[in-house]
Amino acid sequence: MALAPVVTDIEQLKGHPAVARLVGWNPQAVEGVKFDREEMTITVVREAIREACALLRSDPNCPFNYLSDITCVDWYPSDPRFEVIYHLLSIPNKERVRLKVRLSGEMPALDSLTSVWPGANYFEREVFDLFGIRFNGHPYLRRLLMPENWEGHPLRKDYPVEGYR
Amino acid sequence: MAHLTPTPALEAGQDKTMILNMGPQHPSTHGVLRVLLEIDGENVVRMMPDIGYLHTGIEKTCEAKFYQQVVPLTDRIDYLCPMTNNLCYVLAVEKLLGLEIPPRAQWLRVMMNELTRINSHLVWLGTHAMDIGAMTVFLYCFREREDVLRLFEAISGQRMMTSYFRVGGVALDAPLDFFHRVKKFADRFPSRVDEYEGLLTGNPIWVMRTKGVAKISAEDAIALGASGPTLRGSGVDIDLRRDMPYSGYENFKFKVPLGKEGDVFERYMCRVRELRESIGIVQQALEGMPSGPIKANAPKVVLPDREKMKTEMEALIYHFKIISEGFAVPEGEVYQAVESPRGEMGYYIVSDGGPKPYRVHMRSACLANMQCLPTMCEGRLIADVVAAIGSIDIVLGEIDR
């Protein structure tokens, strides 16, 4: 049961294609990096997420051309409250990377990725439905799993697991 | 590529085209998928999948359970391949913990995982063929599926909701005659696949209903997030078992069947060939099954044997501790993906250092595959919609969670 220590130093992690690409593009867009349990996490500023994804998707050396998943974590009551998580996969290079965007609890919103990957559509609708995060530019941002007239967002931490809301 | 949004007509109703509601109680939608179709005569103009009828909030429930209590919930997400879900979840937790799994447990997991793939593909083949009108195949497939379920029952005590894999290993070692029974099944199975293929592959009606139907290009499939046979049917060469091996898959030799055209027939051929590859992996697992322990040596995480628990004080204490207060998992987050029968099944687990997961998210392969449906079906006939839904092999339990 030995876990390797977490690496958060951006200089040490520049060997990873996604980190190199994003830092080379705009160092201000990268808030932090983390290499933990063989997985690379890059925290990106909210405004840059769509462009960062478009850039990674079209990287000539290591194209992260496949969007595996979008989800969210609620860190209530700390601030910034939400973390939207993107898992990208490079099909040619068999490499994964996780992108993160931190959002405050008040009116959380960020750019939609549907113009980069049309497949982001249902994933974003699910996050909108269960966490109440708005995706600007989404073509059809409606509830996906819960009924249309449902109140509240069930996967938020201030929403009870059982009983009445 | 289709837009995944309704036209104004689909929302308001219009004279020229008609809105047809298909499902959620429709036999060809494999559960409770509702599809809104805007049709012009028999032609589909716009298609809009509507889901959520089976939403049970499993992700929320997981946050209120100990890590080991989540395993039975994972069975219920995708009820056709319970062991794949078990595997993906326990691999993610083991990655969080940094646990080493003994080889015998890994090989047992691979073997059961491939039997699960066979089980799932058999249900798919039977129901898909029945949707298109070939009744006999269904009965043949369920005959072999029964054999697989009996094997599940022998090793785990359950036919469907197995919960056989545990964090740190597997629940029990295989019973005495188990490998012999698996061997008998594995020897017999390839000839049974020949039977299914004899009924379908060369059958002119089957070929006419499936060849060139519901096509999707490789670019569209990647952009929409398709995975598994839906992606490989379009010729994209990726299989997580081979390319990003987990649980000892690097020790096994198998081919990854690929299609080219991305139509219903190619997806069918991919899955049927996968049946043969899977039984090959089962054979290899039987031949090379290592001996040794079936649980990791981690007393704070893995439950002690019943016998030890009754005779050793320390084992009893650990048993009591794990059951009553769970085990703490170091802070962190992991995303573990496995190749489920339907595609990339992924578990994203966040730990805050406590005995309950802070967040569990399941990446559903079917949800992404379902997004391909409009691209496949728009501009085609209603009858092809049925073929397309069958060909992506959806399980609504996994989509809605």
Image (cartoon, grey):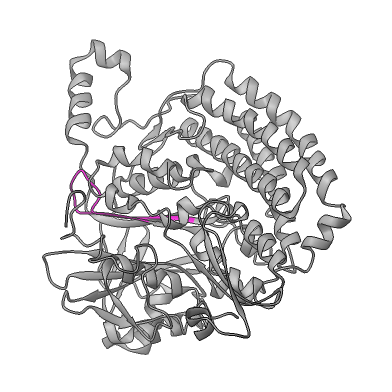
Apparent side of residue B191 relative to residue A27 in the rendered image (left or right) = right
B184 in magenta: no
Q: Looking at the picture, does residue B73 appear above or below residue B153?
A: below
Is there any visible trace of residue B150 in the rendered image? yes
Q: Which residues are magenta?
A: B345-361
| Image coordinates for residue A1, horizontal then vertical, percent | 29, 41
Q: Which residue is drawn at the image coordinates 30% and 37% (left, top)?
A: B68
| Image coordinates for residue A143, horizontal then vertical, percent | 36, 70
- Which of A155/B320 is in front? A155
- Which of B155/B316 is in front? B155
Q: Which image quarter holds the N terminus of chain B?
A: bottom right
Apparent side of residue A133 relative to residue B165 in the rendered image (left or right) = left
Apparent side of residue B7 relative to residue A29 in the rendered image (left or right) = right
Q: Looking at the picture, does residue B186 appear above or below residue A148?
A: above
- Which of B134/A7 is in front? B134
Q: Quadrant of residue B212?
A: bottom right
Q: Which residue is drawn at the image coordinates 57% and 54% (left, top)?
A: B342
| Image coordinates for residue A125, horizontal then vertical, percent | 38, 71
Q: Which residue is drawn at the image coordinates 38% and 43% (left, top)?
A: B90
| Image coordinates for residue B273, horizontal then vertical, percent | 73, 49
Is there any visible trace of residue B254 in the rendered image? no
Instruction: Looking at this view, name the residue that lies furthest to the top.
Output: B311
Q: Looking at the picture, does residue B102 appear above or below residue A139?
A: above
Apparent side of residue A153 relative to residue B131 in the rendered image (left or right) = left
B349 in magenta: yes
Q: Which residue is drawn at the image coordinates 25% and 65% (left, top)?
A: A153
Instruction: Looking at this view, name the residue that lies furthest to the front.
Output: B15
Question: Disc count in the image?
Answer: 0
